[in-house]
Amino acid sequence: MISFLRSFWTGVLRPFFQRPPALQLAALCHRRTDDGKVVLLVSSSSGRWILPKGWPIDGMTAAEAAAQEAWEEGGVKASKVGQSSLGSFYGRKTYSNGRSEPCETLVYKLKVADVANDFPEANRRDRIWVTPAKAAELVDNAQLKSLLAKF
């Protein structure tokens, strides 16, 4: 009986009580150099390497919001942003008060037109340009590693 109740809870009832994951949008900023394709990683508040990402913005498409985050966090101006998601990855968004929640991040390809040294979060973020393979080594999230390795 106990195993039936556990199975019933897990398979039938639990999904009704769970919230969907929060949604964030990320930009996979890329450009060509003499050495080949490189992508942008920025530092998170905890010092990890991540893609520029943030929350949806009222009045903007998901791709436009991803491009806005690329500007704010990485100083990147786009020449072209893909309108459909390249893929997504799941993780946890942790807040400064220690609370965390599940989060799905949709990733949009962004071709870089220009990079500025003066941008909104320049004093809070480091940024590096690396090959997609090196970026895959530097990020923590396994699904993001896979996206970068395939890029």
Image (tube, helix red, strand yellow):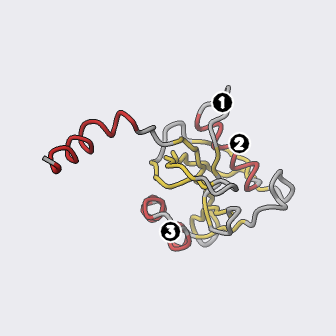
- Residue extending farthest to the top is 59
Q: Is residue 149 left or right of residue 29?
A: left
Residue 73, percent across and down? 73, 54
How many numbered marks are there?
3
- For the point 57% across and 64% down, which residue is it? 37
Location of mark 1 (residue):
60
> In the image shown, does 93 or 42 lie closer to the viewer?
93
The label number, if any, that marks residue 96 in the structure image: none
- For the point 83% across and 51% down, which residue is it? 120
How far apart are the alpha carbons under marks 2 and 1? 9 Å
The label number, if any, that marks residue 136 in the structure image: 3
How far apart are the alpha carbons under marks 2 and 3? 23 Å
Residue 140, percent across and down? 52, 68
Looking at the picture, which amino acid does disc 2 mark? Gln
- For the point 65% across and 38% down, which residue is it? 65
Location of mark 2 (residue):
68
Label 1: few (<14), some (14–19) or many (≥20) C-alpha neighbours in 10 Å: few
The answer to whether mark 2 and mark 3 are in CB contact below 8 A is no
- Residue extending farthest to the right is 118
The answer to whether mark 2 and mark 1 are in CB contact below 8 A is yes
